[in-house]
Amino acid sequence: MNLRRLGCAVIAIGLLIAGLHERVMAFPVDGDQTTLPAKTELNEDALARPREVFHSEILGGKSELVRLGNLAFSSPSILGDVAQRAGISCETCHVNGAGNAKFFMPKMSTRPGNFDTTGALFNPKADNGALDPVRIPSLRGARYLAPYGADGRMASLRDFVHNVIVNEFAGPEPQPAILDAIVAYIQDIDFLPNQSLGPGGRLVGKISESERRGEALFSKPFPHDANMSCATCHIPSAAFVDHTQHDVGSGGLFKTPTLRNADFNAPYFHDGRFDTYDQVVAHFDRVFELGLTAQDQKDLVAYLTAVGDGLQPYEYDGAGATLKEISDFAVLLGTAIPAGDKEVVSLAVDTIGGELRELTEHYPDRKDTSVPGGEQERAAARAGLKEVVLLLRRIDMAVGEGRTSDAAADYQTYRSLMLAAVPSLLGSAQRWSLFNAAVHDRHYEALRQTMQSKHMSQ
Amino acid sequence: MIGKRVALSLLLALACARTAAAAALDDAAERYRPYAIEGIGSALAGARDLRERVAAKDLAGARKAWLSARAGWERSEVFTAGFVPELDALIDAWPNANSGFHAIEAKLFGTGQIDVEGDTDTLIKNLDELHTRLRDMPLSPQGLLDGTVRLAYEVGESKADGGESRISGTSLADMQNNVSGVEFAYRTVFADRLREADAGLADSVTKHIEQLKTVVKAPDLPHVDVRALRRSSEELVVSLQAASAKLGLRRSTLEAQSR
C-alpha cells in the first residue's frame, strides 16, 4: 500500500471525528498548522516507501502462509467497522512493515508518529479515558524483539496481534488460520542489512573515529552505577535489546527498543517524544547523570547512527512496486479458487481490488487538466486496471455461487493480463502519471491551491 | 444447397431480430432524451439562479443555487463524459478548478467570496450549449449503456478523502445523484428489453442497483460502508456488462477514450 491510502484514512477519520463533534473540519491537504501538525503525511502520494525485506525470500520464496498474512495485514476487513469505513488496515500504520513517522490522527495522536491505542474512536470499550498515545513501532526484526507492546506486556506476538484486532480495533474474532498467517508475516520481516554491523553487534569496516569512541562509551559503566551501561540493556549481540522493561525516566516501565534500523524509526521513546538521537542521548545524560561532554554526546550519536543504519531503506513507489505486491497476493487465489475458499477469495479480491483502484488514480482522467498530454495512454491504463478489478469481482461472485470452474477461467485471464498487458499499458502511461515527479507536483499544486481556499475562510 | 438456404434464412432471421431489438432500444434511448434535457435544464436553471444571487451579493442564496445546479449535473453524468467529453471537462474540471463547478465551489464554500461572475457566466454558457445540443444530439443505446456502466463503477470509488465536492461537502449527494442517474437510465432504456431477453439477469441488475442505493443512503460520507460500496458497484457493473450481449450491444469499456 502506498501512503495515499494513509492520507485518505487519516482524512476519513478526521471527517468521522468532525462528525462526532459536529463541527466542520478543514481538509488538511496542505498540512495547515491549524489542522494537522507539520510532517504529517497527507493525501499526497509519496514517491518512495519503506523497503520491506523478507527472511523467506532469502531462503527461496515466501510461503503461502506469509502471503496470506501480508494480505490480511493490508486488509481493512479484518478490523472493526470504524476502521473499515476509513479504509484503515494494519498496513496504514506499519507501512511495508516499517513504522510511520508521518501518521497523525486528530484526537488520537499528540504528534506525528504516535497513536492512542486505548482511545474511544475505534472501540469505545477499549477507551481508558486518557490521551496516552504510543509510538508506532517498526516491525522489522519483530521475531527477535519479544515481549510485545511498548510496555512489553505480552510475551506472545500472536496474543498481541489478536489484541490489536479484537480489542484495539474492535474487529471480529479472527480465524485462527488468519491470525497464524499475520504472525508468520510479521515474523518474516527482516531488519534491513547493515554492513557496518559485524558479529556480536560490533562495528566493522570503515568506521569513523567518532563512531569508535561512541562504541566505547556505549559499553562504559555509568558513573553512579558501575553495573550499568547503555549496552547492559541494548545488548549488541542480541539485536540491541534485553527483552526487559525498564524505567528510564519517561514515566513508567517500558521495554528496551532495538537500535537496529533505528535511524528510520523516529520518533523515539514509548510515546515518540524525541525526534533525534541528540535528544535521546541528552535525556539519558540528564536522567542517569552520565556527565557526558558535548563531544561524548556527538560520539554516541555517531555510534547510534552507524548501528541504526540499513541498506536501501526506501524504494521508489512506482507502479511496479504495487504490481509486485498485488502479484504476491494474487498467488493465493490459485489455491483458494479450486478449494472454493470463499473467505480467502473475498479477502484477496477486496484487498487487491482496493490496491488496483488506488493505482488507477495515479493515472489522472481527462478532467484533470493539470496534466497535459497522454490522454489516450492514461485512459488505456485506467481502463486496463478497471477491467482487472472487474475480473476479480467476477471471480469473487463465481466462487460465492459455487462456480469454481468459471472463477478458475477468469483467474487465468487475470493472470495473463497482469503478466504483460497491464504492465505494458501502465508503462506507456507512466510519463503522464503521478509516478512522474513533475506531473505529481503539478497535480497536487492544483489541488492545494483549490483546497487552500477552504482554510482561508476558517 | 438446401443447407446454404437454411443458413441464409437463419442469418436473415437473426439480422431481422437484431434490427428489431436495436430499433426497440433506439426508441428507448429516445425516451431518455427528455430526462437528459431536464437534468441539464435543471443544472442550467440553478446556474442562472446562482448568477442572480451573485449579482445580489447573496452568499447564502448563491450557495443554495450552486447545490441545486450541481444536483442536476450529477444526475446527468451518465451521458456527459461519453457524449460531450469536451464540455464535460470544461464544466467539471478537477482538481485544478480554473473554471466550472469546482472553481465556483472553491470560492463560495471555501473562501466565502462571491466574486464568481465570470466563472458563473462561463458555466452558464457551457451548460446552455449542452442543453441546446441535447435536443438533436444522437443518443445511441450503446453510448448510454457505456455511460451507465462507467458511472456505476465510478460511484464505487472511495470518497474517503472527501470526494470531488469536498469543499461544499456534497460528495455523498453527488453519489446519490449518480446512482439515481444510473437507475433512471437503466430503467428507461434497458430494463424492459433485458427482461425479455434474460429475466434472471434483469433481476440481478435491479438487485445490485437497490444494494447500491442502500449503501449511499448513509447519513454522511464518513459512514458510507466503503467495502459494501465497492462490492455493490462492481457487481452492478459486472451484471451490466453481461447484459450488453443480451441487449445486442458491445460490452462496455470503462473509459470513454479507450475503446
Image (cartoon, rainbow, N blue to C red):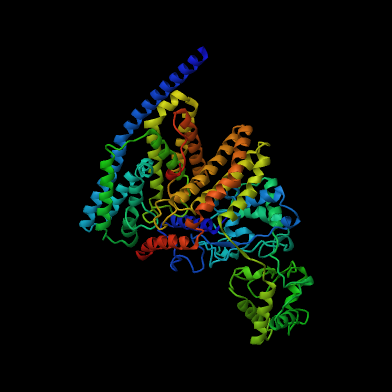
Say whether residue B41 is visible.
no
How many numbered marks appear? 0
Give the image quarter of residue B14: top left
**Image point (34%, 44%), residue name:** B84
Give the vertical position of A338 relative to A307 (above or below): above
Say whether residue A390 is visible.
yes
Q: Is residue B63 left or right of residue A275?
A: left
Give the vertical position of A232 relative to B14 (above or below): below
Q: Position of residue A410 (x, y in %)?
A: 59, 37
Q: Residue furthest top?
A: B2
Q: Is residue B126 left or right of residue A145?
A: left
Question: Which quarter of the figure is the C terminus of chain B placed in?
Answer: top left
Q: Is residue B6 left or right of residue A194?
A: left
Q: Position of residue A12 (x, y in %)?
A: 48, 55
Q: Position of residue B219 (x, y in %)?
A: 43, 47
Q: Position of residue A145 (x, y in %)?
A: 72, 63
Q: Nearer the viewer, residue A420 or B240?
A: A420
Give the image quarter of residue B13: top left
Q: Nearer the viewer, residue A148 or A425?
A: A425
